[in-house]
Image (spheres, rainbow, N blue to C red):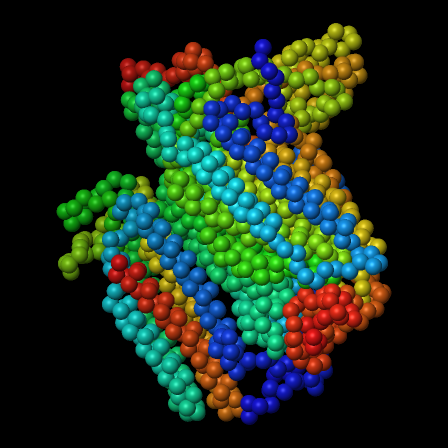
């Protein structure tokens, strides 16, 4: 009675289109759904910023071409308003973090590659996987729909600090509802990933034979599982404050626009929101970078034709990083009136957490020593990731020490710091991953010339966007400023803003070769077989594209994940599933 | 299941974890739930410690109904017991008994919610009025009065854009009897001009009640979620159990794990909110 | 005449006593960051060239021995510990734990709101008058109980922060509505203002940092081709600029106009009149700004900061002090 389901079920009925491509339980289809949806959100978030950059470069001047279509709340007479600017800013951050990068790194790459890399036929809970995507999409739509609310979208920063967010317009309520959906989707996904990575590994695939990509996804999933619920709790509390008139975050004695808020009970704490928010949001930034580090590691191993240097250090560092990420959160709150004891604790943990990051970066750089480097398009992105991640990580140091943070807190230095890690950091890793795994997903290669163009101009312009920001921050220019020239010291560096804006618009132009390449190659790209990169990990043992159930024969693993250039072998790579 | 591939360890325990997939997954989910309720309990602690003098009741019993909650605690613990018995019966292949215990669990959960309904609605009919100038009630000078709206009091309207009651021209209030006595003071007429704030005993009343409603409300939602799942098994279980009794027992085991967790949360909630 | 100074693309001018330690830490950090980056970068570029794939070259399977990297890692960790304990903690400790003694310090309450800074001075009696939330109005932004004797000499200044140089300034910071952040870049001061809390913060303005003197030191000559209204909108001319007929286009003490369009128009006129450079100085060289998003006019929430010597400050206090005539009652 229970036996018939344990046979590999290859002879399934042909599914209707909507079951095969829309409401599919196949992790590969879901992975592609996540990727496409997230890329659309990424473009939208980028578009928001490009509009904001006009206002920053030429404050008070009407936005060309599209200004008149933005509506009066956002842009009266085509000039972006203060509220419109703040709404775009808050939504840019929210969309990039929650609707684009994490769904790409985890929902897209994690979903598609992880089961293949461990030799599994699918995720542990395929229907739960489908549910995760179909909860993410409505969450994203609710977020975007907030632009059409009276009063516009959420405009209190992606950080939604109370009391500002509590007294904000309706868009903020939709932000909170959207977050509940997104968090739920994330939680279901993280359970799936952990169970899959632990329980569905192929025979012979012990933990220390796992590709680093899988380790990165595993640690990321634990972060999502354990760090998101406090934000869900906080979102519920803020919803209660906004809708039910509670005062979780509203202290006694508030006077807004000259009106005493006597109808509120008071007694709440704005700092409580910050603690709950950052308790998630700090691990969240490691959720943003760990999948990227996983992707980069795979590409470096494949294109250096040698094992990664310090595999065990990489793994232990990733685990330690995950653990430490839970105890650094208040370094975002140094300026809230924190005393010496608390600030010393958080400075110390922040200094300590830099150690595993440095170890991971160093291992990846040392992996280039003694290599035979193939400068393929994915490798170009992977290589440029390394110094960019270094800049991002290093600029975290002055921010992590309270004394220097006094000057740099809430300035463009912070924006430069974290964008270096996510933009030429994670987004480059995402591009690298797309070029690298495109042949597996479609059976065709992306065009290399267009890829090189894409890389070269993206690299130049992305530095043009974020390097000047570090200087602006040093000059004291604050973030979230509708008009930087309003302040005297901001006016002095207005020229840098113009440079940043033009770099941003040119950066968009540099994406055009990629978009063309992506779609053109799906139909016209050079056809390739299962393992065009001559790589060792298990996903390359499956056909390109893999069928439902992934592997013709269930793989057995005989060796580690990066057996390249093994002395005495005929080829310079030994796939994991081939007897040594 | 159509077009599904065979997933390893769907029912067979894995050597590393000793559990089948569903059970491991559920434990992970419970870990995240611990973080969720943990965050709320931590918020409670932070808010209570930072509360201005007099804004937090000395004991939950001042405002909350301890006897009803005690009854609810017994009900919920019993439902956990019946849940285990359902699973045990199914493991021993006694489908009818298993389904019966599932139904009893469902009914007990329903009883919990009914009691909760009475607890909540009591709060929304009870009011507190904070005065600008003190009044004399029952020989004492007070600056806030609790009670029920008198029969001929004009209805209060909630103006949603300020999320509270608009201050009326006047209200007629039947004050609560003083503690330990059965005698209610006579109906009071309170002028709108003297009212600083008026609120029912809903979440907007005070941070204590906000915390109470949020914690018990979220817990209640978890009970409802569990009930939906149990109902589904009540309706489809017999048929499924006949085809796949092992798998069915596993599913009930996982549901039971979730249910015990929900019970455990209440066992923390009850003393923290009602007794402390 | 003192050395010129201006806001530019690196650290703003430093005008407080404790600020030099912060700047020193920032400098040390960036040297350290530079050393690490260049070190990594050199090794990185070396590998990219030496180990590129080419005919006859194969990769090495055996890992290179890592003693250098282990010691480097330990060194990095040790240096970070030094930065924390040696350079950051002492500064923060002084910033937070060592308030100036009550007898010697100059106290002022700062009450932030959407979108202005209110400065409440205790006046000659040194005592702050009590405040009440229900008295807050447009003309009484801090809700001062004006009938109280302690409030009779209090000064409430909106968007103008006057203070004496060379004295310990003790700010009691709070806000009426949402979180703001009290930031003075030139003083290296930044503190979130959180509703429901009064947070103290202290600093001392350098003896020679009177705002009049700073304004003079910030006089700059801008070549016309580089002049643009955004850059110069807060500046005033230090001399008259006339056209060919002797008409004054830009008078001494005048700015370039209130909008970008007006400014560009005037600059064009000046260029046509043969003016090749403009000598200008900031109207208000020192500013208090808001560093935490507080709404749609967050960017405009700034106060002019005016630093005086003791005599100048006393004169300002005299001018601002209210005198309540008791026989008016």
Question: Going by the image, does A490 lie left or right of C21?
Answer: right
Seen from this angle, which residue lies furthest top? C246
Height in image: B141 above or below A382? Answer: above
The C terminus of chain A lies in which quarter of the figure? bottom right
Rendering coords of residue A146 (x, y %): 59, 53
Height in image: A224 above or below A347? Answer: below
Q: Is residue A89 visible?
A: no
Height in image: A86 above or below B93? Answer: above
Of A444 and C124, nearer the camera is: A444
Rendering coords of residue A334 (x, y %): 46, 41
Q: Is residue C329 visible?
A: yes
The N terminus of chain A lies in which quarter of the figure? bottom right
Residue shown at 38%/16% (left/top)? Answer: C321
Rendering coords of residue A537 (x, y %): 69, 69
Residue shown at 76%/11% (left/top)? Answer: C243
Residue shown at 30%/54% (left/top)? Answer: B127
Of B95 and B196, nearer the camera is: B95
Residue shown at 40%/74% (left/top)? Answer: B259
Q: Quadrant of residue B115?
A: bottom left
Give the number of marks.
0
Question: Going by the image, does B37 lie left or right of A137?
Answer: left
Rendering coords of residue A355 (x, y %): 54, 50
Question: Going by the image, does C76 lie left or right of B202?
Answer: right
């Amino acid at each position: 009675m229970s036996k018939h389901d344990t046979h590999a079920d290859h002879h399934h009925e042909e599914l209707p289109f909507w079951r095969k491509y829309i409401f599919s339980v196949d992790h590969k289809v879901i992975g592609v759904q996540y990727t496409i949806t997230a890329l659309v959100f990424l473009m939208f978030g980028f578009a928001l910023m490009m509009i904001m950059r006009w206002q920053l470069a030429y404050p008070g001047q009407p936005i060309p071409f599209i200004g008149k279509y933005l509506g009066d709340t956002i842009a009266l007479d085509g000039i972006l308003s203060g509220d419109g600017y703040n709404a775009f800013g808050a939504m840019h951050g929210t969309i990039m973090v929650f609707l684009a990068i994490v769904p790409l790194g985890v929902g897209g790459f994690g979903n598609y590659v992880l089961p293949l890399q461990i030799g599994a036929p699918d995720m542990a809970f395929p229907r739960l996987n489908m549910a995760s995507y179909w909860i993410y999409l409505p969450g994203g739509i609710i977020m975007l729909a907030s632009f059409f609310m009276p009063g516009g979208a959420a405009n209190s920063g992606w950080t939604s600090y109370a009391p500002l967010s509590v007294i904000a317009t309706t868009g903020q309520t939709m932000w909170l509802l959207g977050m509940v959906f997104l968090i739920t989707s994330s939680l279901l996904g993280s359970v799936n990933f952990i169970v899959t990575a632990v329980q569905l590994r192929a025979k012979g695939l012990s933990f220390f034979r796992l590709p680093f990509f899988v380790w990165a996804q595993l640690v990321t999933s634990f972060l999502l599982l354990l760090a998101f619920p406090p934000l869900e709790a906080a979102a519920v509390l803020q919803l209660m404050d906004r809708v039910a008139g509670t005062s979780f975050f509203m202290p006694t004695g508030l006077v807004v626009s000259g009106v005493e808020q006597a109808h509120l009970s008071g007694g709440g704490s704005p700092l409580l929101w910050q603690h709950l928010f950052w308790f998630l949001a700090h691990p969240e930034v490691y959720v943003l970078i760990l999948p990227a580090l996983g992707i980069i590691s795979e590409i470096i191993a494949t294109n250096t034709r040698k094992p990664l240097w310090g595999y065990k250090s990489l793994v232990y560092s990733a685990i330690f990083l995950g653990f430490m990420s839970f105890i650094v959160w208040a370094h975002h709150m140094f300026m809230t009136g924190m005393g010496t004891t608390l600030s010393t604790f958080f400075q110390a943990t922040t200094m300590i957490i830099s150690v595993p990051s440095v170890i991971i970066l160093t291992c990846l750089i040392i992996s280039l020593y003694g290599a035979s480097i193939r400068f393929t398009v994915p490798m170009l992105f992977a290589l440029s990731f390394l110094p960019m991640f270094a800049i991002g990580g290093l600029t975290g140091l002055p921010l992590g020490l309270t004394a220097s943070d006094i000057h740099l807190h809430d300035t463009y230095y912070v924006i430069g710091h974290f964008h270096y890690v996510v933009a030429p950091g994670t987004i480059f890793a995402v591009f690298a991953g797309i070029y690298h795994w495109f042949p597996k997903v479609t059976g065709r290669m992306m065009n290399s010339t267009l890829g090189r163009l894409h890389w070269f101009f993206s690299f130049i312009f992305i530095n043009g966007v974020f390097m000047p920001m570090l200087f602006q921050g040093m000059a004291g220019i604050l973030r979230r400023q509708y008009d930087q020239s309003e302040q005297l010291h901001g006016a002095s560096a207005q020229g840098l803003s113009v440079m940043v804006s033009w770099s941003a618009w040119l950066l968009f132009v540099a994406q055009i070769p990629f978009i063309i390449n992506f779609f053109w190659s799906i139909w016209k790209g050079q056809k390739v077989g299962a393992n065009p990169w001559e790589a060792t990990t298990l996903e390359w043992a499956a056909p390109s594209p893999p069928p439902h159930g992934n592997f013709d024969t269930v793989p057995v693993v005989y060796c580690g994940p990066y057996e390249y250039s093994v002395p005495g072998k005929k080829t310079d790579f030994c796939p994991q599933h081939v007897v040594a | 299941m159509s077009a599904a591939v065979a997933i390893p360890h769907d029912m067979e325990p894995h050597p590393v974890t000793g559990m089948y997939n569903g059970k491991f997954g559920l434990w992970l989910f419970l870990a995240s739930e611990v973080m969720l309720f943990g965050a709320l309990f931590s918020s409670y602690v932070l808010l209570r410690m930072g509360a201005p003098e007099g804004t937090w009741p000395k004991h939950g019993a001042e405002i909350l109904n301890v006897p009803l909650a005690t009854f609810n605690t017994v009900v919920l613990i019993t439902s956990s017991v019946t849940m285990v018995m359902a699973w045990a019966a199914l493991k021993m292949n006694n489908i009818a008994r298993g389904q019966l215990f599932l139904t009893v669990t469902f009914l007990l959960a329903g009883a919990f919610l009914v009691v909760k309904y009475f607890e909540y609605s009591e709060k929304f009919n009870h009011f507190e009025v904070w005065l600008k100038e003190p009044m004399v009630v029952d020989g004492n000078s007070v600056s806030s009065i609790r009670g029920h709206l008198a029969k001929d009091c004009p209805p209060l309207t909630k103006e949603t854009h300020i999320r509270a009651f608009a201050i009326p021209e006047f209200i007629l209030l039947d004050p609560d009897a003083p503690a330990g006595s059965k005698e209610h003071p006579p109906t009071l007429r309170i002028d709108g001009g003297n009212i600083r704030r008026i609120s029912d005993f809903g979440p907007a009343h005070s941070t204590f009640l906000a915390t109470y409603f949020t914690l018990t409300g979220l817990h209640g939602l978890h009970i409802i979620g569990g009930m939906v799942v149990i109902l589904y098994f009540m309706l489809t279980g017999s048929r499924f159990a006949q085809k796949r009794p092992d798998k069915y027992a596993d599913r009930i085991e996982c549901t039971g794990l979730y249910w015990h967790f929900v019970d455990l949360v209440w066992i923390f909630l009850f003393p923290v909110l009602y007794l402390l | 005449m003192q050395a010129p100074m201006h806001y530019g693309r690196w650290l703003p001018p430093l005008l407080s006593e404790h600020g030099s330690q912060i700047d020193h830490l920032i400098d040390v950090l960036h040297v350290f960051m530079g050393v690490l980056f260049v070190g990594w970068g050199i090794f990185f570029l070396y590998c990219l060239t030496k180990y590129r794939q080419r005919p006859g070259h194969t990769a090495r399977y055996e890992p290179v021995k890592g003693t250098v990297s282990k010691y480097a890692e330990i060194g990095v960790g040790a240096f970070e510990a030094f930065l924390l304990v040696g350079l950051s903690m002492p500064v923060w400790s002084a910033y937070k734990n060592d308030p100036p003694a009550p007898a010697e310090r100059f106290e002022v309450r700062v009450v932030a709101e959407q979108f202005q800074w209110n400065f409440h001075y205790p006046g000659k009696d040194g005592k702050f008058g009590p405040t009440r939330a229900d008295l807050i109005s447009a003309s009484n932004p801090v809700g001062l109980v004006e009938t109280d004797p302690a409030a009779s000499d209090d000064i409430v200044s909106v968007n103008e922060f006057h203070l004496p140089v060379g004295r310990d300034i003790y700010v009691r910071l709070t806000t009426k509505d949402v979180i703001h952040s009290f930031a003075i870049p030139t003083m290296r001061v930044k503190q979130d203002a959180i509703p429901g809390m009064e947070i103290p913060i202290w600093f001392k303005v350098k003896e020679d940092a009177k705002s009049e003197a700073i304004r003079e030191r910030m006089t700059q000559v801008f070549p016309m081709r580089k002049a643009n209204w955004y850059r110069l909108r807060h500046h005033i001319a230090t001399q008259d600029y006339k056209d060919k007929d002797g008409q004054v286009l830009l008078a001494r003490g005048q700015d370039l106009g209130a909008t970008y369009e007006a400014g560009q128009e005037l600059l064009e006129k000046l260029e046509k009149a043969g003016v090749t450079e403009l000598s200008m100085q900031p109207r208000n060289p020192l500013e208090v700004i808001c560093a935490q998003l507080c709404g749609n006019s967050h960017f405009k929430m700034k106060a002019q900061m005016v630093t005086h010597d003791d005599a100048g400050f006393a004169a300002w206090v005299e001018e601002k002090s209210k005198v309540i005539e008791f026989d008016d009652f």
